Amino acid sequence: MIHSKLSKVAAIGLIAASALLGATPARADEVPETETDPPRVELVLDVSGSMRAADIDGATRMDVAKQAFNDVVDALPETTQLGIRVLGATYGGKNKRTGCRDTQQIVPVGPVNRVAAKNAIASLQPTGFTPIGLALRGAATDLGDTGSVRRIVLITDGEDTCTPPDPCEVARELAAQGTSLVVDTLGLTPDEKTRKQLVCISTATGGTYASAKSEEELTDRIKQLVDRAALPPPVTPAVVAGTEDCEGAPLLAAGVYTDRELIGQHRFYRVAVRPDQELRASVSISLDRPLNRDYGVLLKAAAPDGRELVRGVDAGSGRADVLSTGLRWSLPSSDSDSDSGAASNDVCLIVSNSFASATAAGAPGMPVELTVGLVDASDTPDAPGLGRGWLLLLVLAAAGLVAGVLTGWLTRWWVAKWREN
């Protein structure tokens, strides 16, 4: 599943749809209903040596983190599937190769056992290195891929000291796998380098970054993130496979759809639009890997014969890891028929991109989410007109003519007077 990462962005453009006549289209609401699995959350805690610093409310960072964890465990809903993984918790030596493998799951993901979780946390002591990248890979494996909402909450006071693997690259790898896994990051009194790394990790997976400088802030932040994991995405997109031309493209009804598009590829889809309807469509592509500069995404609507009808306009999503664009189209008023039973017109939606990457141009494709909406057509003029502006234009023309005549007469009079003198 790649869907929850993008669905909040794409669902903004979703419009309530009318039923379609003619050929039976693929429908987003025809996805088989399955029992919703409980959310799965893994807390990943940095237990490296720097957590000994006593700079938060007079207590060590480790003690503050422990108390925050205990408060969160007490407040967890019974339905939450919780796991805890640590990094830098067992090896206190100077062998970096050994220390950079130091990550373990101390509480397996499952129904909350509050006593076991608190006991496991109580025994932790700040010890070693900070292998964040390796811990993220381990946490993703711990959570599995059951189809439920999955979230990693990383709490650390410093940047990774064990690259490779680089934690930002690991986050992009997880996003590219299409596993619907979100990583949220929390920085304990972070410096600028740590902040940038944590922002990079969260951004790559559609997560959030926050900092905490007190026990109360840390507890509140963790509770918010765990509670958010229990919320299902507002829309579950239907999986669809676009084609390389319009003729064989899947016919879509109103809804939200997900697909994957290779770098430089064009994906075609069809929508049946009645003369009394307006098509509204948007597309969002998740930037789940490093890309060369100067890139973009394009959404076009075209007739089956290839004639372009309209192309989309870029629309910011508010997130640096998602590119979006949208369009709207209906038949010109002179060609439309108010009869809702009139034959539908097939419109081809074409999604293309201008991405380039020296290292990640192949499969899997970029995660794409396409939103299709059909609403009643609105009355719009066939072409922009001046309307009452004609009157203003005539007034301006008359004023210009009078001003020109007067200027010419005054100029001639002044020249004549100058010659007489």
Image (cartoon, helix red, strand yellow):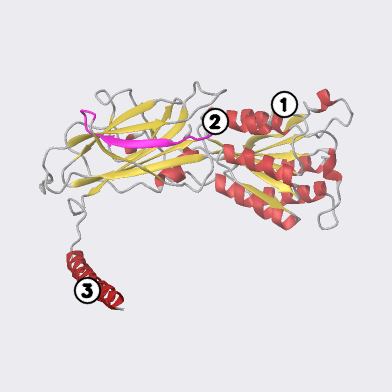
Seen in the picture, residue 321 relative to 214 is either above or below; the reply is above
* Magenta part of the chain: 291-306
**N-terminal-most mark, 1 or 2:** 1
Q: Name the image quarter holding residue 270.
A: top left
Q: Position of residue 65 (x, y in %)?
A: 76, 48
Q: Which label sits in the foreground, 1 or 2?
A: 2
Left or right: residue 105 compared with residue 127: left
Seen in the picture, residue 48 relative to 16 is either above or below; the reply is above
Task: Write the residue at 77% across / 29% down.
Answer: 162
Q: Where is residue 325 in the image (x, y as percent from the top left)?
A: 39, 42
For the stretch drawn in magenta, the main secondary structure is: loop
Give the alpha-carbon distance from disc 2 to disc 3, as whole Å.
65 Å
Residue type at mark 2: give it. Asn
For the residue labelled by badge 2, is the local secondary structure a helix, a strand or a loop? Answer: loop
| The disc label shown at residue 292, or none | 2
For the residue labelled by badge 1, is the local secondary structure a helix, a strand or a loop? Answer: loop
Left or right: residue 283 compared with residue 114: left
Give the alpha-carbon distance from disc 1 to disc 2, as whole Å.
22 Å
Is 295 contained in the magenta span? yes
Which residue was labeled with disc 3? 409
Task: Write the residue at 73% across / 46% down.
Answer: 192
| The disc label shown at residue 164, or none | 1
Residue type at mark 1: give it. Pro
Residue farthest to the front? 421
Q: Which label sits in the foreground, 2 or 3?
A: 3
Left or right: residue 21 compared with residue 295: left
**N-terminal-most mark, 1 or 3:** 1
Residue farthest to the right? 93
